[in-house]
Image (cartoon, rainbow, N blue to C red):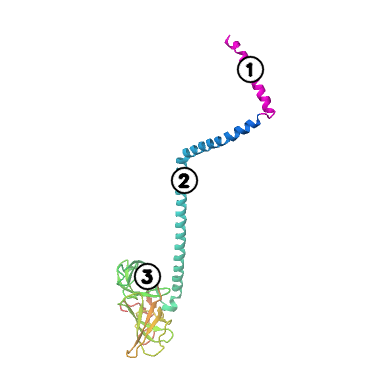
Amino acid sequence: MKGLRNWPLLAAALVASVVILLIGSAGALRPADNAASIVLVPVQYALHRAVEGFGNLLRAPYDLRYLRAENQRLQMQVDELIYQLALRNEIELENAALRELLGLRERSPDIFGPDADLLSAEVIGRDPSNLLRYLTIDRGSRDGVRVGMPVITARGLVGQVREVRGNSAKVVLLTDPSSAINALIQRSRATGIVEGQTGPNLVLRYLPQTEGIAQPGDLVLTSGLGGHFPRRLLIGEITEVRRSDVDMFQEARLRPAVDLDALEIVFVVRHFTPIGVDGQADREAAPAGGN
């Protein structure tokens, strides 16, 4: 039989295996192992890196999809945080403005008389050309707004209602060239007329030529003369005085107290106590027109 005929070969292989194991256990093959390791280890390392790189290459599409999804998720979180921060800042700014207006409303009887009536309004439009200085507010005739009523903020005078519709009104700013307001220098008590002009500033005209009557830094208020505006509303601060001996009057340039380009909420003064011609207070509604 074929298996029995090969038994000498099998016996020889078995004997050789036993001999090799005995020699290996005795450490005789260690130099050969070391030599083989020197040759084979770099090859094994290169093969391992190649297999690892191939595996990474196979995982790359999955990793790319994961990274894109993770980036999108993180971007959404960033956008949400930015929105929440902007909303918080907006609420804080609105609360600060409302606190100022609430303070003005609480002081209104002392400023505008015992029957003062202030109506809050939001700015919903501006002159797009910036040539005619006016605002559009969301209050109109249905809210009791009439032509000629003063418009203010907690910081001072804004302007005057010039046109009225049912649900809106046009407010001409005090910087408009058509605006003219009776005014008073707080320090010297000198009076004049504040007029609008082209540009963001104002001019105070018809001041006496008395030296030192107007100085940079002086505050200018409404005088209340004529009954068209309440008394003591802040108009602005003098920045420059022009005086010439050949002129009958001197004049001063003013910076408005209110940032007219950043208005969002204003008050329409529907009722105040104006000063009569004789200097006495007359209780009546805000005028229907005029400056």
* Image point (46%, 41%), residue name: 60
Q: Vertically, is 67 above or below 142?
A: above
Residue wearing tag 3: 261
The Cα–Cα distance between marks 3 and 2, rounded to whole angstroms, is: 46 Å
Say which mark, if any, is on residue 12. Answer: 1
- Label 2 or label 1, whichever comes before in sequence order: 1
Q: Vertically, is 73 above or below 175?
A: above
The answer to which quarter of the image holds residue 115 is bottom left
* Image point (63%, 33%), residue name: 34
Give the secondary structure at mark 3. helix
Circles 1 and 3, Cβ within 8 Å, touching? The answer is no
Residue 259 appears anywhere in the view: yes
- Label 1 or label 3, whichever comes before in sequence order: 1
Q: Amino acid at mark 2?
A: Leu
The x, y position of residue 51, in whole percent, is 51, 36
Circles 2 and 1, Cβ within 8 Å, touching? The answer is no
The one of 57 and 221 positioned closer to us in this rendering: 57
Which numbered mark, 1 or 3, is in the foreground of this view? 1
The x, y position of residue 25, in whole percent, is 68, 28
The x, y position of residue 212, in whole percent, is 41, 88
- Label 3 or label 2, whichever comes before in sequence order: 2
Residue wearing tag 2: 67
